[in-house]
Every structure is written in C-alpha cells, then in structure tokens.
Amino acid sequence: MNTEPKKASPILDPELSQALKQTPRRFWKRISHNWGWKLLSALLAVCLWAGLITQDPNLTRERRFTNVPISINGQETLLNNGLIVLSGLEEENLMMDSFRAQVPQRSYDVVNASNFNPRIDLSRITQTGEQTVRVLFTTSSTYGTVEGASPAELTIMVDEYVTNYRVPVTLNTSGEYPEGFHAAAPIIEPSTIAVSGPKSLVDRVVAVQADYDLSSLSARAGTTRLALPLKFIDVDGNVLESSLLTAASANTVLRTIGVEQRLYTSKQLDVTYYAMLTGQPAKGYEVKEVTAVPSRLTAAGDPAILATIDAIFTDAPVSVEGAKESFATDVRLRKPGELTYLSANTVTVYVEIGPVITGKDFSNLRITLRNVPENLRASLDRNVTGLTITGPQLVLESLRSKNIALSVNAEGLTAGEHTVPVEVTVDNEHAEEFQYSFTNSTVVLTLSEK
C-alpha cells in the first residue's frame, strides 16, 4: 500500500517567534503606561459623544403627561362677536386625561406639560348651538411635538351674548326697624342696571334683587349706607345661579347694590278731637260719638322738636250743621312743619248722629182691670200712678196721656190678695224704642166672691 509521506512542520524563524511571545507584554505595557491620562481621555471621548447625541434634534424619546389643565383663548373675541359659551367649559372638562409627546433627548429631563400650552381657541367660533373645538398644542424644536391627546377635542354649547339695559333693582326686605325709630324709604343706587350674558338666561331675568335686613341697622338717628350682594331673579321669583350673568352700570361691573337708609327718632301722637266739629245737628238730634281712623300716628323728626308736640290736629273742622244721620268723611291733617315724617296725611272721621234721648213724665194715669173672673169682684189699692217715658225727644214731644193705657191682668187668679205688675201700652209707632219707669210698678189686686 502506498502512503503519502507526511509533510514536515514549518520551522518558525527564532526571531519572529520571540517577537510574538513578547507582543502581549508589550501591548499591556503600552496600555498601562500613563494609564490615568488614557482613562481621562476615554471619559472625555464618551462625554463628547453623548453631547453630540443630545444636540441632535432628530434623536427623540416619547414622554407622557397626565392630568393637564387646558387653558382658554379667544373669550374676548367671542364676546365681541356676540357669542358666549353656555356650557362645556366646566372645571372638570378643562382637565385633560393625558397626552403624548416626542421630546428631543436634550430636553427630556426638563420639559413639562406647560411647555406645550394645551389650549382651545374660541375666537374661531361663529355660530350658536353645539360646537366641537380641538385642543391645540405648541410645537417647537426645543420641546418636541405632541402625537396624541385624550381628549383631543371638547364639545361646548354656544349661545347669543345679549344685554338687557333696564332691569329694575328691588329689595327683599325682612326684619323690623330699631324700636323708637322711623326710616324714610331706602334709596337704591342704581335703581336699574344692565344684565349681560347668554340670551337663554338674560331673557329669564326680570329683576336684580338684594336682601335687606332692617334689624341689622344701628339704633341711631342718621344715614346708613350699605353695599348688599346682588342676585338675579326670574319671573317665578326664583334666584338664577349662574356665573355667566353679569350686572353693570355706567360700564362698571357690579357685584353689590348700594342702599342708603336714613333713620329718624319717632314718637306716637294722638289725633285730637278738640275743635274737630263745627255746627249743630238738626233739632232733636245730637252727636253721639266721633272717631278718627287712624286715631294714633307715628311722627318722626328731631328729638327736641318731637318733645314739644303732643297731638295732631285736623286741618279744618268737620261740619255737622243740620245733620240727622251718621256719616264719614276724610279730613286732612295739619302736619307741623318741623316734623320730618307723619305716618298719614289724612284720617277718616266717623260722626255718629242720633236722636236726642230725653224723658217725659205723665202723672195720674188711670189703671184699668182686665180679665177679671165672672164670679169674683176686683179692687185695687190704687187706681192711678205716675209714669216716665224715655225716648227720642221729637217723638215724646207729640205724645199725650190719651195715647197711654195702664192696666193689670187678673186672668187665672183666684180669690184673695195679689201683687201684680202694672202693664203699659202706648199708641205710637216708636213705642218699641221707649223705656218706662213707674212711680209704682205694682199694685195690690183683691179678688172676692160675689
């Protein structure tokens, strides 16, 4: 069998072999030589490399921001265009859940959400009703670009912006003035104001009102000035709570209503009946009673002046000349010029006119017997008596003895003595108005067998 002869191993040059053996040692020697400077150089190289990377705007990293507030732009422009946002911009809607941005490497650690200025622009809205507005962001090479947001847009309701220029101002008054004081009508400033806001709300406002508690006034004479918070009132008397409504006067926005109140010392004065009437009623008639309503008035003014006034007089007397019937009339009062206030300018005077009531005496009027039983005889201890009749003077003047009948009634009585009343019958149409007084109102009736 033929076999190929083995090739002989190459023999290295001794010098080369020696050189190869010393290479690692030489390499390490070179590395370890001045190793501190070499390490510093390496670090500087790394830093230079990192700096070059961070200066490259094309190198970015994604960053996420959460719970970011959204600002509003263009509100003034929207109002100038006659529009206003009615709803949709409540605080909870102006807080964005999150957004993502590609941030340059160099700004990653310092950037914050405000650098992207998330906002909505209302100046672009030109119509009323439901509108959708996109959330805008600021893009820059310094802080990067926003790639996604939640929510990316807001839905708002837009209404006309209108102004009602003559809304009356009223006071919702409660409590009482301090005791012993009177107040003039409060002065409200301003008395009318302009109300601006969404048309759907402004159309419902019928008044601007302030709560005025009279008991809060100090018990002292003089002028008090107050600034009371205002509120908007609808046709049903309910308060409209809305931050979209504004009140203004003379181009100045108002938050309060001015109220000026003047207090005066007060005193109760009676209406005097002295010299209130003049003349005489018709013959046979007289004034029964005079009443003024109100009979007691509140007067106010300087305390020193009030101390000198005790009563209030009527301006002119009431005539009763020839009167036969009661009547009422309004009479002006004589207000002392020193008084600041009198609770009434007139009183109603009620004059009661009635007939003069007098008495008339009748003497020796005969007493007759009635209904004496047939089997008995009757006798009286006296047959005449005196009688006084009280009634209208004019009627009594025409009354005569012949119009008067006195009697006793024996009906149902048995034999014996009986004390019985004397009965009177008057032939006159006014008999029911009379009152009677006898000299002897009873007599002794004796009944005996025939």
Image (cartoon, helix red, strand yellow):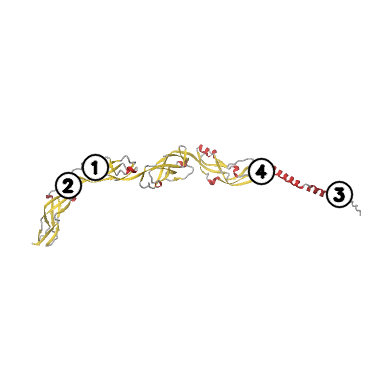
Where's the C terminus, which quadrant?
Answer: bottom left
Kind of residue indicated by mark 2: Gln
Q: Report the side of 332 relative to 236 (left or right).
A: left
Residue ranking furthest to the left: 450
Q: Earlier in the sequence, mark 1 or mark 2?
A: 1
Residue ranking furthest to the right: 1
Circle 1 packing at 10 Å, graded few (<14), some (14-19), many (20+), is some
Where's the N terminus, which quadrant?
Answer: bottom right
Circle 3 packing at 10 Å, graded few (<14), some (14-19), many (20+), is few
Q: Secondary structure at mark 4?
A: helix
Of circles 1 and 2, the one toward us is 1
**Residue at numbered disc 4:** 106
Kind of residue indicated by mark 4: Arg
Could you say which disc has been placed on residue 18 in the image?
A: 3
Picture coordinates of residue 354 (x, y %)? 21, 46
Answer yes or no: do the residues labelled 1 and 2 have beta carbons within 8 Å? Answer: no
Of circles 1 and 4, the one toward us is 1
Q: Earlier in the sequence, mark 3 or mark 2?
A: 3
Q: How many labels were placed on the picture?
A: 4
Answer yes or no: do the residues labelled 1 and 4 have beta carbons within 8 Å? Answer: no
Q: Secondary structure at mark 1?
A: strand
Picture coordinates of residue 252 (x, y %)? 47, 38
Of circles 3 and 2, the one toward us is 3
Between marks 3 and 2, how big is the CA–CA gap? 175 Å
Between marks 1 and 2, how big is the CA–CA gap? 23 Å
**Residue at numbered disc 2:** 393
Between marks 1 and 4, how big is the CA–CA gap? 107 Å
Q: Earlier in the sequence, mark 1 or mark 4?
A: 4
Q: Secondary structure at mark 3?
A: helix
